[in-house]
Image: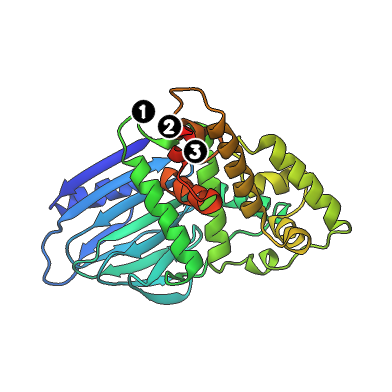
Amino acid sequence: MAAVTIRTDDVDRARAEVGRVFCPHRLTPEAGVRNVRLRMAARRAGGVGVIDLDYGQAVRIQPPALETFYLVQIPRAGSTLLRHAGHTVTSTPDLASVLSPYDPSDMRWSEGSPHRIFYADRRAVDRELARLLGRPVDEPVRFDPGMVMTTSTARAWARGVAFLADELSQPADGSLFDHPQVAARFEQGLIGQLLLAHRHSHSDLLIEPGQQANPGRLVRRACALIADHHSEALAVGDIAEALRVSVRTLQDCFRRELHTTPTAYLRACRLDAAHRTLRSAEPGTSVTTVALQHGFVHLGRFATEYRSRFGEAPSATLRR
């Protein structure tokens, strides 16, 4: 896992260090400001990353087209005036700014506006969109420059980014993302949720359910695949890809046939399997081991969902 932590008051060093993490750019303190108070912590795993960045002063930032990556910039406080791809957005904690790789940007960060920034590799975004659609697309993905952060889907996505930041801050050999398959699946989930939560140039394709001649057969095949592979790092995109349909088509068929979603069905299957394992566990078995064995990477969420489904904590089942 790549990690960079920088503190400096020097404008030239701030420009160089931030440029190494992102790309070369112009950094200019606003009128009356002589220096900056840069504080930056950058963490990255695979095709995604989280950068906490604060210039401490009012600055103007002018990067060229990013070319190989996307950025979602969420102010923790203060505001940012963004001009990007012919649009102007005033970003606040309730409205993130989103930079696509294809156009230069002009940003003015106010004094006292620390940002949490989500980084996504362009190729990873293209791959995840193809998985969601069940086919590749030829046109580039261009996000709307302003992302409302107060919707339930955006808040869920932001919680995922916070979890990513926390895990990437753990010491070596102490993070769930030290396992490359877990890291890859979480990367897919975060990028997929972003594609579903925020408007972009292919959003209309994602909201059009595909036509499936035999939805019952598709759902039976999906359920069988889940039963056989639920303990692996399986995501809904993997199921759709294996069955050669889009995620949207799979979701639509599950709702019509089972009145649930593939994600909920997969989670219930994992919970049931974990319950069986805990009931028959040998002495010395830990709840954490069982949870990870059955595909749960967020242990607090596992405990909450387990109690909701079975009426007791996992540790209570284990003790019996």
Earlier residue among tags 1 and 2? 1
User: Relative to residue 157, is residue 2 depicted above or below?
Assistant: above
Residue of label 3? 317
Residue of label 1? 173
Earlier residue among tags 2 and 3? 2
- Badge number at residue 153: none
| Residue at (68, 60) in percent of width and height | 260
* Label 2 secondary element: helix
Q: CA distance from mark 1 to mark 2?
A: 6 Å
Q: Do the CB atoms of the residues marked 2 and 3 lie less than 8 Å apart?
A: no
- Badge number at residue 178: 2
Q: Is residue 301 left or right of residue 56?
A: right
- The picture places residue 207, in percent across and down from the top left corner, at 68, 68
Q: Is residue 185 visible?
A: yes
Q: Residues within 10 Å of mark 2 (few under 14, many from 20)?
A: some
Q: Nearer the viewer, residue 5 or 168?
A: 168
- The picture places residue 272, in percent across and down from the top left corner, at 61, 42
Quick one: quadrant of the N terminus?
Answer: top left
Q: CA distance from mark 2 to mark 3?
A: 29 Å
Q: Nearer the viewer, residue 236 or 105?
A: 236
- The kind of residue on which mark 2 rests is Asp
- The kind of residue on which mark 3 rests is Thr
